[in-house]
Amino acid sequence: MQQLDDGFADRLREELARRRMSRQALADMARVSLSTLEKALSGSRPFTTATVVRIEEALGRSLRVMSQTEPPAGRDLAPDYMGAYSHSAIRWIEQDYVTLRTSFSQPGAVIAYHTRIFWDENAGHLRFAESDRADGAFAQSGHVSMPNLSGHIYLATNESGQHRLIILGRPSRGGQMFGLLTTLQAGAGSQLVPVACPIAFVPLSQLPDAPMGVIPTSDAAFAACRGILDRALNDDFCRLRQ
């Protein structure tokens, strides 16, 4: 078993400083309260296992140190229900992406944020974590399925039985992936409405200076981002039907 060591808080503070990330941003991404995070970092309360797991999922990396007496628990084969893929066969997908989708609230605008896809050594499968979203409280994290039967890539979130799903086609020659997002949109009052839209995953190296958040039509980066996103439908990576 992995044991949480006393240096976890120090390594987390260093990671936040390295990324120039605020504690509030991390709390939003990891879905923990800022008060809980502050108390744990100050040493007034211990980090719980659940909090540590959420933080590591949000950051896309482990900050724990393995016990010197215990062997690593890593596995190289994802479970059958995720497609039984091996780590060595899917290393190409492990990287940071700029994610582009249509804005639900501002007609014509594009939404941009970061998504990291990485291998979870302890769980033995791919995971993903979103960051730099304008609506940080709704940032998603979950597992990645890659079944051979369909040849598609599935990024799934399951939070207390509430699901969100992204279906992506295999990458283009440029490493970009296109597909469809299905989720819930906030409607009037507390109403939630099912909604779907095209989505694109672009390697961060191809859009290193893309602005995060809402990209309106007046933004200098809009044309390039809109052009990439339009490939999802124009090149038949996904279809919308009424």
Image (tube, helix red, strand yellow):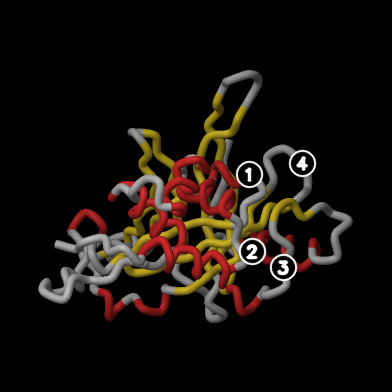
Label pair 4/1, CB-CB below 8 angstroms: no
Closer to the eye: label 4 or 3: 3
The reply, left or right, for residue 78 in relation to residue 142 is left
Asked if residue 134 is positioned above or below residue 185 in the image, the reply reads below
Closer to the eye: label 4 or 1: 1
Badge 2 crowding class, 10 Å Cα cut-off, few under 14, some 14 to 19, many 20 or more, is some
As measured in the structure, the alpha-carbon distance from the residue carrying label 2 to the one carrying label 3 is 18 Å
Badge 3 crowding class, 10 Å Cα cut-off, few under 14, some 14 to 19, many 20 or more, is some
As measured in the structure, the alpha-carbon distance from the residue carrying label 2 to the one carrying label 4 is 20 Å
Q: Earlier in the sequence, mark 3 or mark 1?
A: 1
Q: Amino acid at mark 1?
A: Asp
Q: Amino acid at mark 3?
A: Ala
Q: Report if residue 233 is visible in the image.
A: no
- Name the secondary structure under disc 4: loop
Q: Amino acid at mark 4?
A: Gln
The residue tagged 2 is: 231
As measured in the structure, the alpha-carbon distance from the residue carrying label 4 to the one carrying label 1 is 14 Å
